[in-house]
Image: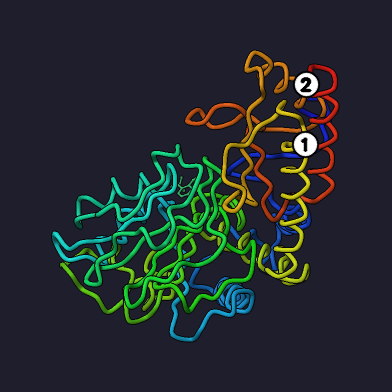
Amino acid sequence: MPDGKPDMTRAWNFSAGPAALPEAVLRRAQAELLEWNGARASVMEVSHRGKAFEAMAARAEQDLRDLLAIPANYAVLFLQGGATQHFAQIPMNLCADGQRADYVVTGHWGEKAVTEAAVYSRPHVAASSATSNYTSIPPRESWDLDAHAAYVHITTNETIHGVEFPAIPDTGGVPLIADMSSDILSRPLDVSRFGVIYAGAQKNIGPSGLVVMIVREDLLQRTPRPLPKIFRYAEHAAAHSMLNTPNTWGWHLAGLTFRWLKEQGGPAEMERRNRAKADLLYGVIDGSGGFYKNPVEPAVRSRMNVPFTLHDPSLDAVFLRESEDAGLLALKGHRAVGGMRASIYNATPLEAVRALCDFMADFAKRHG
Ligand code: PMP
């Protein structure tokens, strides 16, 4: 290579996010990087107000609408700021000063959402699994909900703790808001059950710097306080997410991922594959005779992020070094839970999980 670096090949990447993207999407983006769509320039170098970009943007939105069967009374927004910004911006848009907003906290990201919500609302932790170290989801009957709350907020998949809602909870007439950053598009979804769905792109959609939001139109009409336009979701919806210059590259990559998902068979096929991958990996952990452990209650184990510990933590460094040498990247767990974590989003093929499982079985045999 011209810069003298060795010619490395791509490895299996288990990063929690930014995470592996479908190789076909990256190849397509690479092929079109310099000249895109007859524009004689890169997609990153053309106006977002031009016909070519507008057509791409509209197609990306339509493909997402098709994939999730998004009803007509929902707006689809392509925003910036990361999911973290929207922890704050959602209460800004939906809660009056001091109005109660109910939060069901099942891990680190739910905790963060509560903290950020406190400036523009009165967040109330309606249920939390903190006492179980976030290894469970409190049963729906135990949630302390208020029928007058602005909304109920959940994190459908907790990326760090590896806890995922197996089904959508019923919140009656109170709009359900879901941070789906790490499991959107991984299974079919009944969007009509939600008031707002939002997701940072860097796991199942595309590069970081983009947030996809699906919001029911009546919620856009809430005006609890004067806000600068740039913070108002209704303004973004009216401007088709082009109130200002959007993340054009992120939007384009998201569009390529949506097309890839359609070609692959959509969320139903993703669910089948994700289930097969997760079953394989949890099977190796549970069948290791205690060499590996996952602490999460089986019924709420994440199909996207699989945290696990080794029976002897002094082996952690060896496991990480050997796995990297074997072409298995980014298995270090989050510092909040320690140990290891394998993130196996839509773009991770079964073959990658098989390679990981083979490595883990062999490692346990050698070090057990
Ligand atoms: N929510 C969830 C579920 C996440 O996994 C993450 C990031 N990993 C965030 C929110 C925060 O996302 P961002 O860094 O894009 O603000």
Looking at this view, is 346 or 254 the one in front?
346
Figure label count? 2
Instruction: Give the side of residue 329 with respect to residue 117, left or right.
Output: right
Mark 1 is surrounded, within 10 Å at the Cα level, by few (under 14), some (14 to 19) or many (20 or more) other residues, namely few
Q: Is mark 1 within 8 Å of ligand 1?
A: no
Judge: label 2 CB < 8 Å from ligand 1: no
* Left-right relation of 358 to 210: right
> How are the residues colored?
rainbow
**Residue 347: percent from left, percent from top:** 72, 53
- Looking at the rendered structure, the secondary structure element under dot 1 is loop
Residue drawn at x 35%, y 50% is: 113
In this rendered view, identify the residue nearer to me: 115 or 281.
Answer: 281
Residue 322 screen position, x and y as percent: 78, 21
State which quarter of the image contains the C terminus. top right
- Above or below, 330 against 202 in this view is above
Residue 211 placed where, x, y %? 47, 58
As drawn, which residue projects farthest toward the bottom? Answer: 72
- Which residue shows up at 53% across the image and 73% down it? 50
Tell me the amino acid under the disc marked 1: Gly
Which label sits on residue 322? 2
